[in-house]
Amino acid sequence: MDSTTPATAGGFEPRITAFVCNWCTYTGADLAGTSRLQMASNVRIIRLPCTGRIDPMFITKAFERGADGIIVSGCHPADCHYNAGNYHARRRFAIFRELMDFLGVDPSRITFSWVSASEGAKWRDVVNDAVTRVRALGPFTAYRNMVVVQATAPKSSSPEHAGEGEGLPMQSLAADGVAPGASKEVTA
Amino acid sequence: MARIGVFVCHCGENIGRTVDCHAVAEGCKDVPGVVHSVDYKYMCSDPGQQMVKKAIEEKGLTGVVVAACSPHMHEKTFRRAAAGAGLNAFLCEMANVREHCSWIHEDREKATVKAIDITRTIIEKVKHNVPLSTIRIPVTRRALVIGGGIAGIQAALDIADGGREVILVEKGPSIGGHMSQLSETFPTLDCSQCILTPRMVEVYQHPRIKLYAYSEVESVEGYIGNFKVTVRRKARSVDEEKCNGCGACTQVCPNKKIPSEFDCGLGKRTAIYVPFPQAVPNLPTVDRNKCLLFMNRAKGRPDTCKKCAEACEKGAIDFDQQDRLITEDVGAIVVATGYQLYTIGKDQPKDNLKGYGEYGYGTIPDVIDGLQFERLASASGPTSGKILRPSDGKVPKRIVFLQCIGSRDPQKGMEYCSKICCMYVAKHTMLYHHKVHDGVATVFYMDIRAAGKGYEEFSRRAIEEEGAQYIRGRVSRMWREGDVIKILGFDTLEGEPIEMDADMVVLATAMRPQPGIDVLAQKLSVSYDQHGFINEAHPKLRPVETNTAGIYVAGACQAPRDIPDAVAMASATASKVLGLFANEMLEREPTVARVDEGTCAGCFHCERVCAYGAVEHKDIKDRAGNVVRVIAYVNPGVCQGCGTCEATCPSKSVELQGFTDEQIWSEIQALGV
Amino acid sequence: MTKIGYFPGCSLHGLSREYEESLKAIVAGLDTELVEVDDWSCCGASSAHGTSHLLAVTLPARNLAIAESQGLPEVLAPCAACYARLASARHEIEGDTDLAGHVNRILVRDFKNTVKVRSILEVLKGQVATIKAKATNPLKDLKVACYYGCLLVRPVEVTGGYDDPEDPSSMEDICKAAGAVPVKWNRRLDCCGGGMSMSRTGSVVRLSAAILKDAKAAGADAVVVACPMCHSNLDFRQKAMQQRGAWEGDMPVLFLTQVVGLSMGIDPKTLGMGRHFVSTNSVMARTAGTGSGAGTGTNKATAVAGEVG
Amino acid sequence: MGSHEHSRNHSGPEPLAARVQRMTGLNPACCYQCGKCSAGCPMAAETTLRPHDVMRLVARDRLDKLADADGLWLCLTCETCTSRCPNGCDPARTMDALREIFATGKDGKPPKAISAFHKSFLAQVRAHGRLFEMGLIMSYKLGGGPMFADVTTTPSVLARGKLGLAPHNVKGLDEVRRIFDACAAVAAEEEGR
Ligand SMILES: Cc1cc2nc3c(=O)[nH]c(=O)nc-3n(C[C@H](O)[C@H](O)[C@H](O)COP(=O)(O)OP(=O)(O)OC[C@H]3O[C@@H](n4cnc5c(N)ncnc54)[C@H](O)[C@@H]3O)c2cc1C
Ligand SMILES: Cc1cc2nc3c(=O)[nH]c(=O)nc-3n(C[C@H](O)[C@H](O)[C@H](O)COP(=O)(O)OP(=O)(O)OC[C@H]3O[C@@H](n4cnc5c(N)ncnc54)[C@H](O)[C@@H]3O)c2cc1C
Ligand code: SF4
Ligand code: SF4
Ligand code: SF4
Ligand code: SF4
Ligand code: SF4
Ligand code: SF4
Ligand code: SF4
Ligand code: SF4
């Protein structure tokens, strides 16, 4: 019954941030808990009302803050609690993926999935698969280094200014002319 | 500076077995802003809640984090406790260390580290929480019902009987809808008029129902509890106050050859007419497209005919009457606009449906549809209930019914099953058998769908006791030879082609929403499917609500429905409306979006992604009152709090309260190394 | 002068040469020039269709490719069977990039599939006003049964829906413009037996006789067709029908182009009226006295018939 | 394309429905056996397998039953079934595909008269680029068609100037032959499946 992914002794343990919607995946994860489904402990969940709320910049921010992998999970396409929020999210992420690709982030560090409130076991599998995959990829440093090099605003890493625009990594990239077009598309 | 209190729960052994709760409490102590951090066996117990309250009061906490079970379990409990101690409820959050930690891990050390992470994340979030108050919206406790078929009638009566005022808007001259056209109704074969007419009269006489017949909804503004509706009262050319319904006018009108809509073209009416004798309101209407006087006026000629006006002793006829626009405030809306039948004819303006040439395109006069058959079978119909065929008035001895015409036909018609036709065809064969004893009724069907209480028994009765011949297979083509209709079909059970002669053919044509439903749905900003049927909010759990709060749906405008379904839905909408009206104010979670007026660029990306139509335009004016800028405004009554707009806004000018960028950034920040 | 590509197809150069003769005779009057597809080859007809799908698409595609290289935006295929093969090849290549690639590789041509395929009904329908204006010899009392058969108006996916597949009207409209009176009848869209004329004569006799009987019952003086195959089954096979007792009487079967040509007062010989198996003299007699050259028309027709048959 | 490749990886032969779907892009499972196709089929009175039967047998993987029957070969490709099918099943196209499968001769054979006709016809087209009708009649009769059933009518055909006695070859004959050969190669490949 224990399906915790075995950690390579003393080896690298990835840190994974999960952005999940309140109605489907968060509740599915609750169900995994009430069903006592064992899984890897590497994932930290951030609860949002809907995947439609997820700004792709959250992902870049999480990478910057040391995440080695990301999970984005919400309701199944036709089941969105808010009708269409996940549809908008999917559109955004399609563009976002291209951007990540452009930046050289291995797309398999980011897991997109649909987990409904009744899919506790699926949530466990999503978590374990992501951990296994990212563990194999090793620590993610490229982006962090890149941001450190390119950041124009040094305060970007201090918690007090976390929410402020000028500290956002993407904007620092845009300011360097790396991806202004892309960043526009992301929000369009 | 924040003063946060952290309360770590053991949940007996549930958390404590895997997570070192004391260590979690200790581990949070050094987080900047945390002034109190403790652990306890059962936080949700009364002593547990008292601990929270006491700490708020004694330590002057500005935020509370309870590290315990899922917020879906006890968020409300602890928010209530915090509020009890004078702290704004929305400054209290839960860190889920049970479902998302202790229950899914065994390694105590790792679980404890994770529990600390989870708690610290929420601590950072709470630092950015601001006091919010539940949104309270006033509710206008009157309802609008659109459509006066059986569904609309039932909804109006139930709401009015529940003590609230109702405005019933019907576009036709009379209420009653399609049910008033039916002869007898399955599965009990009771007379449609007999059960419907009393309800229509009740509507008319109800002190709390205001009936606007011959009227349409012009525009709708506002949101749940606060709709402003403009109704166009079309000019009947008859003064309602003066007319006493004597009918003298209709007797004298010289234009008597107009096909009657009520009789589906099988009977005739005059230009000034009452659609049927039991009409409610029992007032005549001048059909301005057919009245000689108006036809002359349209050509710029002087009025000639005024026979109706001359016959009217009350002087009720008013040829110069104009449409009137009336505005009503309501808190809830029920849509009950019903259905139409798929027209077999070739001419379907503005419709991409092609019709069915192989069945005679309505060019063979004795090929009729189900509603026409209802009129023939109805005692009050054009033939006084005798089954006579339209072409020559003879009694058809061989009648053939074709099921699924236009339904279950993704190629030319609708892919869906119209749900009621199997039943009404069975009914039609019985009515026919009762009236033409020596006649033979044959039905071409694909499946018999009779899934209701007493339905299967009913359709079997048609076959076993009333002699209907059921042939499984679709018909390919029909044509007329002399005065018989030739039918080319196939019996898939026998495996043989069939060429059959019929005297009359009845097509069970598909049910579709009323024309114009799309325009109405757009006015109401409710969604509809590709066929025009109004979408329910959830097919199982919210079947009579629409996606727009405060707007409900009943009857055949939501999907093909029979009378029992339509009435059940109508009563369900009434209970929803009365539930909404039970309070003077509407309370809602404050998780709604807010626009920063200073930075909003007015690009309205947010408006485009909002599935609820919550984003409105707001004019920013200068001192002289000139509009200088148009920006977005999120109506808190309508916003459902999905946050899609916030993720979309290019200038980060719209924020979802409770899930602001700042809050989420801090959570991500807290996860950092 | 409008120019339109022209794919005659094998039948118009063989068994149904009067179809081509009459077509060529009328287009001049309609201000239209036919530009024949260079070195066209057979569309494959029902034999390719019944043997290999790829062949059934590629054979027509060769002709479309040639037309394309001639710069022709559209091609008229007067034979209903050729029309169906060409139009459906066009339709299938358009909807299937794999197939398109396959076809292009076999043809070794840079074929973009830009050529529209038009039926004779589609082309003449657009000329109804001109036909009416040019009908100096309108076929006033001639009652005609317009026969569409299978392939002229369906399936709509292939035809593009220029006419209703279940209740078409274009042939009637054209005949009316020529002064004839279309009758209402029931078997306009029934199959005559198509390409089974030789291999299964019995079926053709059964199906075609039913069509003729219905036309006769509706009071038609002649059946009008726009397909060599239909013509052959309904005209040439009348003798077989009679021999097998399936049909009595003689029903003239005219090509639509002949109907239009007669109304324009074109010499019946030029229209190939004498090539039919069932004499068209009764039709000539019917049109007698309507137009200017009516008397001579009758004589000519008789002469032609006598000369040939 | 991908899905059938996938299905072929399973052991055992490709099911007929999948094979037809691969060839036609149509899903035989769409047919709900309403019989409208057969009701309108002009050959329904003569055949034992009507279009709806054919659709059913395809869905049920009954190549054996299809091979035994005449239905496929009597189809006139009149498209009545296709244009009236409520589900867009296209029985006519499905039958094309089946004929193509059988034309290889591996799974069953078309009736002699009909295959003789088609063979003769295509032979003429391959030889001349166009149909040489006189040649067709000759080779059809020689190749197994009913002997001189039409002999009484042929002279009058000639008399009416309707049949040419000599073939007319197209210039691009090479290309026409290439088309035939390429299609035959594809058919052979299909047979090898
Ligand atoms: C041939 C036939 C036989 C049937 N027999 C039976 C039977 O035996 N038993 C049974 O249970 N059911 C039967 N039914 C089904 C029955 O007719 C429906 O279930 C029922 O009428 C649905 O009621 P409704 O109020 O939803 O819609 P409707 O009866 O269609 O009423 C809708 C009303 O809304 C009005 N309206 C439409 N648009 C607007 C607008 N924009 N603004 C204002 N007003 C508008 C219309 O004028 C109409 O009065 C039969 C149906 C058919 C076709
Ligand atoms: C195999 C199967 C699959 C199904 N799948 C679907 C599906 O996919 N989608 C769908 O919409 N529907 C489905 N259904 C139907 C669905 O289960 C029912 O529609 C639904 O459960 C009915 O709910 P209910 O509340 O009316 O009855 P129930 O679910 O039966 O609830 C009745 C409750 O009342 C209690 N009770 C009974 N008697 C008493 C008493 N005397 N005093 C106190 N309590 C009492 C019972 O203990 C029970 O808890 C399915 C049904 C079956 C059998
Ligand atoms: S607050 Fe939650 S975790 Fe704590 S005792 Fe109660 S149920 Fe258990
Ligand atoms: S005659 Fe006058 S009072 Fe009587 S029904 Fe007509 S309008 Fe009304
Ligand atoms: S004015 Fe004349 S035509 Fe018009 S409604 Fe009155 S009586 Fe009828
Ligand atoms: S209810 Fe019956 S007749 Fe109507 S569409 Fe469904 S199966 Fe066909
Ligand atoms: S998306 Fe942002 S900037 Fe644009 S209108 Fe909405 S709130 Fe204003
Ligand atoms: S939060 Fe969602 S519902 Fe509210 S305004 Fe934004 S998009 Fe619309
Ligand atoms: S192929 Fe079409 S018409 Fe024929 S039985 Fe199937 S669904 Fe009906
Ligand atoms: S195409 Fe073939 S199967 Fe279809 S209706 Fe015509 S003859 Fe019958």
Image: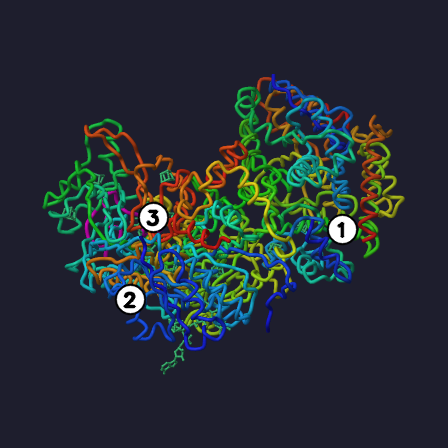
Rate crowding at label 2 as few (under 14), some (14 to 19) or many (20 or more) other CA atoms within 10 Å. Answer: many
Residue located beneath label 3 in the image:
B593
Seen at 45% across and 56% down, the residue is: A46
User: CA–CA distance between discs 2 and 3?
Assistant: 32 Å
Determine whether C216 is above or below B77 in the image: above
Residue located beneath label 2 in the image:
B55
User: CA–CA distance between discs 1 and 2?
Assistant: 85 Å
Quick check: do tags 3 and 1 share a chain?
no
Seen at 65% across and 57% down, the residue is: D52
Q: Are marks 1 and 2 in contact (CB under 8 Å)?
A: no
Q: Which chain carries label 3?
A: B
Residue located beneath label 1 in the image:
D99
Determine whether D60 is above or below C43 in the image: below
**Count the marks: how many?**
3
Q: Is residue B575 left or right of residue A110?
A: left
User: If the image is split into quadrants, where does the N terminus of chain C sit?
Assistant: top right
Q: Is mark 1 on a helix, strand or loop?
A: helix
Residue C109 location, x and y as percent? 76, 29
Residue nearest the viewer, comparing D52 with B605:
B605
Q: Quadrant of ligand 1?
A: bottom left
Residue nearest the viewer, comparing B18 with D52:
B18
Q: What element carries label 2?
A: helix
Q: Is mark 3 on a helix, strand or loop?
A: strand
**Is the residue marked 3 within 8 Å of ligand 8, measured from its CB?**
yes
Residue B70 location, x and y as percent? 41, 66
Residue B365 location, x and y as percent? 44, 48
**Residue B343 appearing in the image:** yes
The circle on residue B644 is none
Seen at 85% across and 32% down, the residue is: D128
- Amino acid identity at mark 1: Arg
Prevailing SS of the magenta stretch? loop
The residue stretch that appears in magenta: B260-284
